[in-house]
Image (spheres, rainbow, N blue to C red):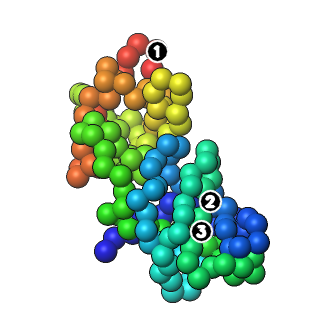
Amino acid sequence: MKFFEIGEIVKSHGLKGRMKAKSYVENGEDLSSVHEAMIVKGKEEPRGYKVRKIVLHKTYFFLELETIDTVESADSLVGSTVLIPEDDRAALSGDEYYWRDLMGLQVVTEEGRFLGRIESIFPTGSNDVYVCAGGSREILLPAISDVILKIDLDKKEMVVRLLPGL
């Protein structure tokens, strides 16, 4: 089974083992289907836990795990990475992608000119913006169909059309 990182535990929250974690998932991603998690602290072996509850809130999430029911046991996991099974990701429509799948994609123009790689993504009111860096300059690419022509996750490539001003 494949797992992916969704965050890092930053502190305990309350007295009953609840934890607050910095989120690596985009705001609004549905985590309600998550039933198990792997917790990795430093170079220790990953440990599996049943998830009682996970609630995403802006740039962090609250996590409740079975067997973690005291502030001391929660504090012992501070600094740990939280991973969940790939199968627990919510299904997306054909033209939607998880941010983590876009990170690092090579960006080329429709003529084949290399522009860089997706370094980060940030939401705006109407669409996300992809930050492409590593080429001759940093380019901000709005995630709209006029600019993003094709995304090929197998080839790890994004084909774009640069509009005037980009």
User: Circle 1 sits in a helix, a strand or a loop, which is it?
Assistant: loop
The kind of secondary structure element at disc 3 is: strand
Instruction: Please tell me which of labels 1 and 2 falls first in the chain.
Output: 2
* Left or right: 77 in relation to 123: right
Mark identifier at residue 64? 3
What amino acid is found at the position of numbered circle 2 in the picture? Answer: Phe
Closer to the eye: label 1 or 2: 2
Quarter of the rendering occupied by the N terminus: bottom left
Residue found farthest to the bottom: 45
Residue 40: name its quadrant: bottom right
- Mark 2 to mark 3: distance in Å? 7 Å
Q: Position of residue 132 (x, y in %)?
A: 46, 37
CB contact under 8 Å: marks 2 and 3: yes
Name which residue lies at 34% across and 70% down.
2
94 sits to left or right of 34: left
Query: Mark 3 or mark 1: which is in front?
Result: 3
Badge 1, how many Cα within 10 Å: few under 14, some, many 20+? few
Q: Is residue 62 left or right of residue 38?
A: right
Numbered badge on residue 4: none
Q: Earlier in the sequence, mark 3 or mark 1?
A: 3
Q: Residue at label 1?
A: 165
For disc 2, the marked residue is 62
Give the residue displayed 62% in from the left and 53% down from the top. 60
Q: Label 3 is placed on what type of residue?
A: Glu
Residue beneath the point at 32% across and 29% down? 148
Task: Give coordinates of residue 101: x percent, y percent.
Answer: 37, 51
